[in-house]
Image (spheres, coloured by chain):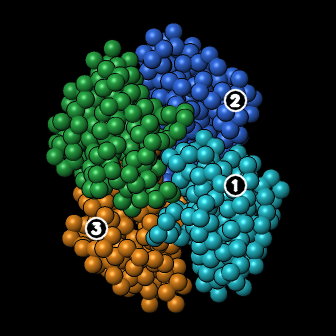
Chain colours: A cyan, B green, C blue, D orange
Amino acid sequence: MPRVLILYYTRTGNTEKMARLIEEGAKSAGAEVSLQTIPGAAPEDLQGFDGIIIGSPTYYGLPAAEIIKFLDDSVKFHGKLEGKVGAAFSSSANIGGGNETVILAILEAMLVHGMVIQGVPKGDHYGPVSIGIPDERVMKQCRSLGERVAKLAKKLAG
Amino acid sequence: MPRVLILYYTRTGNTEKMARLIEEGAKSAGAEVSLQTIPGAAPEDLQGFDGIIIGSPTYYGLPAAEIIKFLDDSVKFHGKLEGKVGAAFSSSANIGGGNETVILAILEAMLVHGMVIQGVPKGDHYGPVSIGIPDERVMKQCRSLGERVAKLAKKLAG
Amino acid sequence: MPRVLILYYTRTGNTEKMARLIEEGAKSAGAEVSLQTIPGAAPEDLQGFDGIIIGSPTYYGLPAAEIIKFLDDSVKFHGKLEGKVGAAFSSSANIGGGNETVILAILEAMLVHGMVIQGVPKGDHYGPVSIGIPDERVMKQCRSLGERVAKLAKKLAG
Amino acid sequence: MPRVLILYYTRTGNTEKMARLIEEGAKSAGAEVSLQTIPGAAPEDLQGFDGIIIGSPTYYGLPAAEIIKFLDDSVKFHGKLEGKVGAAFSSSANIGGGNETVILAILEAMLVHGMVIQGVPKGDHYGPVSIGIPDERVMKQCRSLGERVAKLAKKLAG
C-alpha cells in the first residue's frame, strides 16, 4: 500500500479543491493518503512517504513563498527523498498566467532532491492546472494524477 | 514609424489567426508590419526590423522544429539583433499542455540574441496563448501584444 | 541619470560580491545605484527606480524563499513597475546545479510585472552566474550587466 | 537486462564524448546500450527500449533543431513511451550559456510523452552539463547518469 503525501497552499480554496480530487484519485488506486497544508506541515512530515505531491496558486509565475520556504527547509532531509515519486499542480486566475511555470518550479526542486517525476501523455502534461474553480476537465486531470502517482509509487517502493 | 516582423508556423490556422490579430494591434499603434511564415522566411529577413514577434503551435511543450531550425540558422546574424524588441505567442490544444513553455523557449532564444522583452501585467504575462481557435480573450491579448511591441520598438529605435 | 536598485540575498557572501560588481558597472554607466539586502528591503523600496536587478543563491533550482516572499509582497505595487528594466543574477555551488533556473524564475516574475528584460549575446545570456566565488569571467559579466541595465534604463526613462 | 538508447547530436564532438561516458555508466549497471546519432536515427528506433537518454549542444538556449525535429516526429509513437525512463544532457560553450534550459526542454518533451524522469541530489541536478570538453567532473556525472537510468529502467521494466 503506497503512502502518498499531498501538500498545498491555498487562499481562495481552488488549490484545496484540487488537492482533495488528487486525494480521491490516489485512494482509488489503493494509496494511504495524508493531506497537509503549508503553512502547517514541517519538513519532518516529508518522511515515510513513497510519493509527494505539492500544489500552489500562481503568484508571479512561481509557487507561493510559503511553498518555496518549505522546499528550502527540506534541505534538512536532502538525499532522503531520492527515488520517491514527486508531482505538482497549480491553480491560476488566467490561461497563460504562469500556471505551467509554477508546476515546473516545483518539479525542478523535486529533481534537485533526486525524486522521480512522470508526465502525462494526454491532458495537462506537466501536472494539473485549474483556471479558477476546478471544472470537469480539471477534476479528471486531478483524479488521474492521484492514481498515477499511487501506481508509480507502488511500483518503485515494491 | 517602427517596423515589426511577425513570423509564424501554422498547421491548423490558429497560430495564423493570432498572427493577424497581432498585426492589427501593431498597425493600430503606427507600425509598418511584415507578416511572414516559416517555412518561407529566411534568417536574412530578420534584418531591418525594430521588433520581431514569433509564434508557434505547441509540439511536445516546445516550438515546432521549423521555428527552432530558423532560430539556429539566425546565428548568421548573431549580435545584429541586440537591442531589438522580441515577443512570442503560442497556440495549443490544451490548457496545461505546454503553451507557456513554447513561449519561454522562444523568449530564451531571443535573450541569447540580446533582444529586449517585455511582459504583460494583466492577462497572458509571457505572451498570448490560444487554446484552440482564438476567442475574445485571445483576440484582445493578441491585439494588445502588437500594440505594446510597436510602442516599445518605437521608443528604443527613436 | 538612471536610478538602479540592486536587491540581493546572500549567505556565503558570493551573491553580495556579484551585487557590488554590478553596482560598479551601473555606476560606470552613469547610474545612481541603491544596494539593498533581502531581508531588509520592503516592497515600498521598489518605487522610484528605472531599473531593478535581483540576485539570489541557488536553493533547489529556485531563488531563496526570502526573494520569493519579497516578490509575492510586491503585488502591492502591481502595475507600477510596468516598463521598468529588470535583470537577475545567481550564485551556485555547481555548474548544472540550477543557476539558470534561478535567474529565469526571477525574470518570469519580472515579466508578470510587465517589466522589460534584455539578454546578452556574449557570455551569460540570461544573467550572470557565479560558480562559487566570482572569478574573472563572472566579474566581467557582472560589471557588464550593470552597464547594460543602466544604459537601457536611461533610454527607456528618457 | 534493461535496454537503454542514447541519442545525440554532435558537431564539435563534446556531446559525443558525453554520450560514450553515459554508455559506459549504463553498461556498468548491466544495461544493453544502443548509441545512435541524430540525424541518423528515426522515431521507429525509439521502440524496444526501457530508457531513452538524449543529448544536444546548446544553440540559443535550446536543443539543436535536429533534436527538436526528431521529437516532433516521435508523435507517431505518442503514448507508446509512457512509463519509459527519460534523461537528458547538454554541452555548451559557456557557464550560464543556456545549458540547463537545453536539458529542461528535452525533459519537458519527455514529460509530454508520459516518460519517467529522475533528478540527481548531488552535482548536475537536471542532467550532466559540459562546458567545452568534458573534464573529470563531467565524466563522473555522465557515468553516474548512465548507471542511474539503467537502474531505474530495470526497476520499472521488472
Secondary element at tag 2: helix
Inter-mark Cα distance, 1 to 2? 22 Å
* Mark in front: 3 vs 1: 1
> Would you say residue D108 is visible in this rendering?
yes
Inter-mark Cα distance, 2 to 3? 46 Å
Residue A114 or residue A16, whichever sits in front? A16
- The residue at which mark 2 appears reads as C76
Chain designation of label 3: D
- The residue at which mark 1 appears reads as A14
Instruction: Classify B55 as above or below A147.
Output: above
The quarter of the image holding the N terminus of chain B is top left
Residue at 31% x, 44% y is B17
Q: Amino acid at mark 2?
A: Lys
Disc number for residue D31: none
- The residue at which mark 3 appears reads as D73
Give how far across and how far down residue C85 sits, in percent.
50, 25
Give how far across and how far down residue B125 sits, in percent.
51, 39
Whether residue D108 sits left or right of residue B156 in the image: it is: right
Q: Are marks 3 and 1 in contact (CB under 8 Å)?
A: no
Whether residue B62 sits left or right of residue B121 in the image: it is: left
Whether residue C88 sits left or right of residue B40 in the image: it is: right
Q: Amino acid at mark 3?
A: Asp
Residue D78 or residue A18, whichever sits in front? A18
Secondary element at tag 3: helix
Residue furthest to the right in view is A40
Residue at 59% x, 76% y is A148
